[in-house]
């Protein structure tokens, strides 16, 4: 405990300089602007900025990316409130009550509540990040190859289940497609080429950043240009500083949503949008003002924004301790850590314990910057929303091309970006979620190496995959998730357990 506090204090010393304040300020502001523009997601923002941080020292590079991440998730609330279009998928639940409040002439109050809820939600998540990450890392030391294999499968299945609202099968298909993409190139143990067909570029594998920039950058551009431009709900802004009485009145909602968002964030690949929806649903179920939800409920707005921002620190917990991202932006952040020579995983509290606490300070600094910019720059940020997308999207496309090329100076990575952009756009039109694809590409290497190591250790015997305690818990949980996704099984279980339809 004392050692942890000492390390936490020492971690702050790394960021006690002017460079840190400058980087936090511009990166958070860029994140807010990108998040506020409909169609430009947090994942895309982190992926594009990753390509600009190669020459930075690792701590400052990760600080910039986390500031962009925090800013983008918050920034999406602006367009959700004023345009009825979520700036990022994480802000979809915000539109339900934010836009009705704006139509009533309370846009300023709604943005102030969203800012306060976002700050409080992030702070709740940070508390869990500081407390849970060291314990989870210590627990993860008991994981072997068998457990990591099942953890990868569990991550794909749960991410596919929770991000595909219409059909879980689509989420699983896209997740396992990501695993297959990760198998292209030299395998990680003996460096034997796979699925390269004699092509030297394919033998090098599909790099994560070009694939992500395509799936979340170019695909987003195509999607945005396909949609009709929206009009702003109001041009007037009332007070933006929320009353403390309002926040105190909804303190239980804030606490519950913060806890839910953090827990959802920890689940591999699920992320901020599910955190917001689950928090919103829980708030509505327990509210004394149910009739106001969907018509301009302050409580609903607070629940959604608290939940999605609390999921940010939550998503960083498995990324740091298990090298398994909790969300799509965290997946890019995880890749950036590897690029900068940082090795997240169970050994992080042994090899680099200070880095975990540095990440806590990074999120805290970004949260402070987010709160300041959110309350102080309301009117300038409104002007940004008026930039015509016809002028903005070509600039974003240029960044999508330059970013992947800057990594290795290979034209092949630009082709990869374009391929994943077009495929990603088609899959979006077919209602396939993109988060499991990202998780599959990230977890492919983990699954492949640990499957083969485990088979070598057991001399080809698969029994340990099913009999070791943690492995058993993981595969049974995975099997139950798949079974309960089948409507007939779910209905039979409901009848058997005597649950009514309201449960």
Image (cartoon, rainbow, N blue to C red):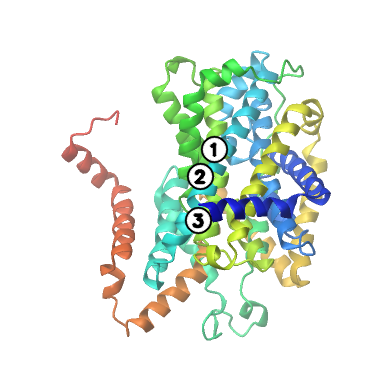
Q: Does the image show residue 434?
A: no
Label disc, if present, on residue 128 of the rendered structure:
2
What is the CA distance from the residue labelled 3 to the residue labelled 1? 17 Å
Can you tell which quarter of the image residue 77 is in? Answer: top right
In this picture, residue 74 sits left or right of residue 401: left
The spot of residue 277 in percent (x, y) is 48, 35
Q: Residues within 10 Å of mark 1 (few under 14, many from 20)?
A: many
Name the residue tied to disc 1. 124
- Element carrying mark 1: helix
Marks 1 and 2 close (CB-CB < 8 Å): yes
Residue at x 73% of width, y 15% of height: 238
What is the CA distance from the residue labelled 3 to the residue labelled 2? 10 Å
Q: Does the image show residue 209?
A: yes
- Element carrying mark 3: helix
Residue at x 58% of width, y 15% of height: 245
What is the CA distance from the residue labelled 1 to the residue labelled 2? 7 Å
Can you tell which quarter of the image residue 191 is in? Answer: bottom right
Q: Is residue 256 above or below residue 248?
A: below
Name the residue tied to disc 3. 134
The spot of residue 93 in percent (x, y) is 54, 32
Residue at the limit of the structure toward the front, as seen here: 2
The spot of residue 221 in percent (x, y) is 70, 48
Q: Residues within 10 Å of mark 3 (few under 14, many from 20)?
A: many
Q: Quadrant of the C terminus?
A: top left
């Amino acid at each position: 405990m004392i050692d942890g506090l000492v390390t936490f204090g020492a971690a702050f010393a790394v960021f006690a300089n002017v460079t840190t304040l400058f980087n936090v300020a511009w990166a958070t502001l860029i994140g807010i602007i990108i998040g506020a523009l409909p169609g430009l997601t947090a994942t895309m923002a982190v992926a594009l900025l990753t390509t600009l941080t190669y020459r930075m020292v690792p701590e400052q590079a990760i600080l910039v990316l986390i500031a962009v991440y925090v800013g983008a998730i918050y920034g999406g609330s602006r367009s959700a409130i004023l345009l009825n279009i979520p700036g990022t998928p994480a802000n979809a639940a915000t539109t339900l009550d934010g836009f009705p409040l704006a139509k009533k002439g309370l846009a300023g109050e709604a943005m102030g509540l969203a800012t306060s809820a976002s700050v409080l939600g992030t702070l709740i998540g940070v508390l869990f990040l500081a407390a849970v990450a060291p314990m989870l890392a210590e627990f993860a030391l008991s994981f072997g190859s068998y457990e990591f294999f099942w953890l990868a499968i569990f991550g794909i299945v749960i991410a596919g289940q929770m991000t595909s609202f219409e059909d879980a099968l689509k989420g699983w298909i896209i997740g396992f497609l990501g695993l297959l993409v990760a198998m292209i190139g030299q395998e990680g143990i003996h460096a034997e080429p796979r699925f390269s067909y004699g092509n030297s570029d394919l033998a090098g594998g599909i790099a994560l950043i070009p694939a992500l920039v395509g799936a979340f950058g170019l695909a987003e551009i195509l999607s945005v240009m396909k949609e009709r431009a929206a009009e702003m709900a109001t041009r007037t802004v009332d007070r933006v500083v929320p009353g403390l009485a309002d926040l105190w009145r909804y303190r239980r909602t804030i606490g519950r949503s913060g806890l839910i968002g953090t827990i959802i964030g920890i689940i591999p690949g699920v992320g901020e949008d599910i955190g917001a929806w689950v928090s919103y649903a829980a708030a509505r179920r327990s509210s004394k003002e149910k009739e106001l939800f969907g018509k301009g409920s302050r409580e609903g707005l607070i629940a959604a924004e608290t939940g999605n921002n609390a999921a940010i620190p939550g998503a960083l917990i498995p990324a740091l301790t298990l090298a398994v991202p909790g969300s799509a932006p965290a997946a890019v952040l995880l890749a950036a850590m590897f690029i900068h020579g940082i090795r997240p995983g169970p050994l992080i509290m042994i090899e680099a314990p200070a880095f975990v606490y540095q990440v806590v300070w990074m999120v805290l600094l970004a949260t402070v910057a987010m709160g300041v910019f959110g309350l102080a720059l309301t009117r300038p940020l409104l002007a940004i929303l008026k930039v015509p997308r016809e002028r903005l999207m070509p600039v974003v496309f240029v960044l999508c091309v330059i970013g992947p090329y800057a990594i290795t100076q290979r034209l092949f990575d630009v082709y990869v970006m374009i391929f994943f952009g077009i495929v990603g756009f088609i899959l979006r039109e077919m209602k396939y979620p993109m988060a499991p694809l990202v998780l599959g590409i990230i977890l492919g290497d983990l699954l492949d190496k640990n499957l083969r190591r485990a088979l070598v250790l057991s001399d080809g015997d698969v029994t340990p995959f099913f009999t070791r305690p943690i492995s058993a818990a993981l595969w049974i949980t995975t099997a139950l998730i798949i079974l309960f996704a089948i409507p007939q099984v779910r209905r039979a279980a409901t009848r058997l357990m005597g649950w009514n339809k309201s449960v």
